[in-house]
Amino acid sequence: MRRDGFTLVEMLVALLVFGLLAAAGAAVMGSTLTNQSAVKSRVERFADFQRLRAVLRADLAQAAPRRTRDTSGQPAGVAFIGGDPWGGNAERLFVVVRRGWENPDRAARPSLQYVEYRLSEGRIERRVRAALDGTALGPAQVLLDGVETSQVAFLGNTEWLAAWKGQAGVEIPRAVRLDLTIEGLGPVTQLFLTTGDGR
């Protein structure tokens, strides 16, 4: 005997199967979106870190042994200051005068630039002066946030030092090591060569 249509039991079974497939599809889609968000966040953290690394490498690779004067006209004792050698400035990572400051507008200024790096409230900041001597630091450029810990060391004649105020015959350290613990990336060690003697 020929039947037209479906029985109630067949309809309920079909709806159950459809519901299971829809639930599984929604779970897979939700998991995909969550993973995509996590991957995007991690990629952005890596991009921020790579930008920091590129700027640090450019500044340190072009370090110049040029001493500067502060806003009161007092000359700096050394060309490169690393860490907090005299006390009172625990946030400072290092201070360097770098060569190769680009000048596309051909302004009346030197190609040297005073640069200071600090760790302030979990952010690595880069600040510069408008002129080498007698001017105040400009606004901070945040290069990386979410820095949980940091430790900087400077290679002198033969050993790594926690702070740098120059050594006999070595105005600029030969290398700078920066150990960071970064939120989302974990511990990272970076080593940068400078223009210091013996390179």
Image (cartoon, grey):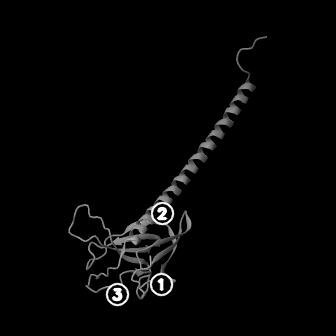
Mark in the foreground, 1 or 2:
1
Name of the residue lying farthest toward the front: 198
Mark in the foreground, 3 or 2:
3
Separation (CA) of disc 1 from disc 2:
29 Å
63 vs 12: above or below: below
110 vs 156: above or below: above
Q: Quadrant location of residue 172?
A: bottom left
Residue at mark 3? 77
The percent position of residue 111, horizontal first and vertical second, equals 28, 70
Q: Are marks 3 and 1 in contact (CB under 8 Å)?
A: no
Query: Which amino acid, mark 2?
Result: Phe
User: Which residue occupies the foreground of this view, 71 or 4?
Assistant: 71
Q: Quadrant location of residue 105?
A: bottom left
Query: Which amino acid, mark 1?
Result: Asn
* Crowd class of label 2 (few under 14; some 14 to 19; many from 20; radius 10 Å): some
164 vs 113: above or below: below
User: Which residue occupies the foreground of this view, 158 or 162?
Assistant: 158
- Left or right, 195 with respect to 5, comes to left
- Left or right, 119 with respect to 17, comes to left
Name the residue located 30 percent from the left edge and 81 percent from the top edge: 68
Name the residue located 55 percent from the left edge and 53 percent from the top edge: 39
Residue 49 got which mark? 2
* Crowd class of label 3 (few under 14; some 14 to 19; many from 20; radius 10 Å): few
Residue at mark 1? 157
